[in-house]
Amino acid sequence: MSKLRLNITMSLDGYVAGPNQSVENPLGQGGEDLHDWLVKLQTFRALHGDASGGETGVNDDVLREAFENIGATIMGRNMFGPVRGPWDRNDPWRGWWGDDPPFGHAVFVLTHHAREPLQMQGGTTFFFVTDGIESALAQARKAANGKDVVIGGGASAVQQYLNAGLIDELEIHVVPLFLGAGARLFDNLDGRKVRVEPIRTIAGPSVTHLKYRVAK
Amino acid sequence: MSKLRLNITMSLDGYVAGPNQSVENPLGQGGEDLHDWLVKLQTFRALHGDASGGETGVNDDVLREAFENIGATIMGRNMFGPVRGPWDRNDPWRGWWGDDPPFGHAVFVLTHHAREPLQMQGGTTFFFVTDGIESALAQARKAANGKDVVIGGGASAVQQYLNAGLIDELEIHVVPLFLGAGARLFDNLDGRKVRVEPIRTIAGPSVTHLKYRVAK
């Protein structure tokens, strides 16, 4: 059965982005530090077109596993870009990731504003979904063709899926960092409804990888 | 050098107590569930006067270590009890822990309302400190006589000590639970000032033990 898996990096105080996200600061003030552990890894570099080295080891193993058997991605509008309101018809936002994004498959972006699919290089196509999270998941499952679907943020999109009971697995990379403000991952949750069980804990250098199954 | 060590259980969404703390619900709604992993352990039972069994293993080892070399405890008024305002002179609150609390040493309670020390059975004496967190720490260090001092909550007291740069070590027991509301441990922090480095991660059944050193 195809699973919906959350995969995200969180500060020790629970933030997945710092305050004041903008074009200059995609992850908000201080938010870039969340990904210090990530950007130096071999798997990350290879996904971003740099096949020349990078760190191997526990963290890299975990990252490689996180991308295994993934056939589609879901993200909130806030993860796709800082733009709000209707898309600019003349110069629409094309994501943070350049012409060749690291997904390599269909990406479903939750938005209130309709837009034609945006085909990028390397197999990534962004689809803009205006009829809700369940529709996005159904479309993503179909595109994934039996593989799993991953959701990577932002916080609000994750919360909607969690509260709706639609996420099957949570993988949280906890970094030893206090952001102090920003977007909290686990906010606006109904704790009586969302229950999780640990699958495993892996301690890597400078980051702890927590994996949970959502109890159904 | 005597250290100030934080030792506390936190839900996956960052709470150390649920909402609506009261005499009936010391840890707020749902908050008791935070300590499910704890109350069944041999070390916990022995500390609470029950020498007859209890669970051993990884979690018990971690708990025993957490109590090693501790000579005094600091807590906020909110951890000592639900009472607010001046103490009742006729029937003052004596803590949550009965006549023989599990501390067995001097406990310094942060409060705005002066009160005579309260001597309990088993070596625990509660001292009520009205002149601030630094004074409480100085008194606790003196009482600890070379051993470490532990702070166990509540959230507000921990935040004050963290922001003042006075905590040396954090041990956070993360339980797979969403409380959804209540007292957040890592709130009101200045993330640029508080920096931590991992010491170790231990995965026990149903709880992950994260330990950090605060960078000075």
Image (cartoon, coloured by chain):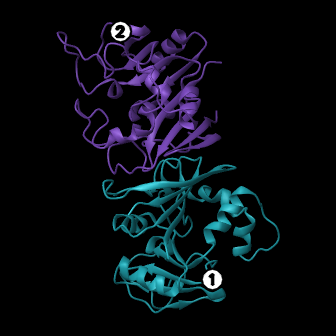
Chain colours: A cyan, B purple
Tag 2: amino acid: Met
- The reply to whether residue A17 is visible in this rendering is no
Give residue B120's mark.
2
What SS does tag 1 mark?
loop
Q: Is residue A34 above or below residue B190?
A: below
Q: CA distance from mark 2 to mark 1?
A: 66 Å
Tag 1: amino acid: Gly
Residue marked by disc 1? A104
Q: Quadrant of residue A173?
A: bottom right
Residue in the picture at 32% in, 13% down: B99
Q: Chain of mark 1?
A: A
Farthest-out residue, right: A52
Residue A38 place in picture, x, y as percent = 66, 61
Number of disc labels? 2
Residue in the picture at 66% in, 86% down: A122
Please identify, in this view, whether the residue under mark 2 or under mark 1 is nearer the observer: 2
Left or right for A105, reference B187: right
Residue A167 place in picture, x, y as percent = 43, 68
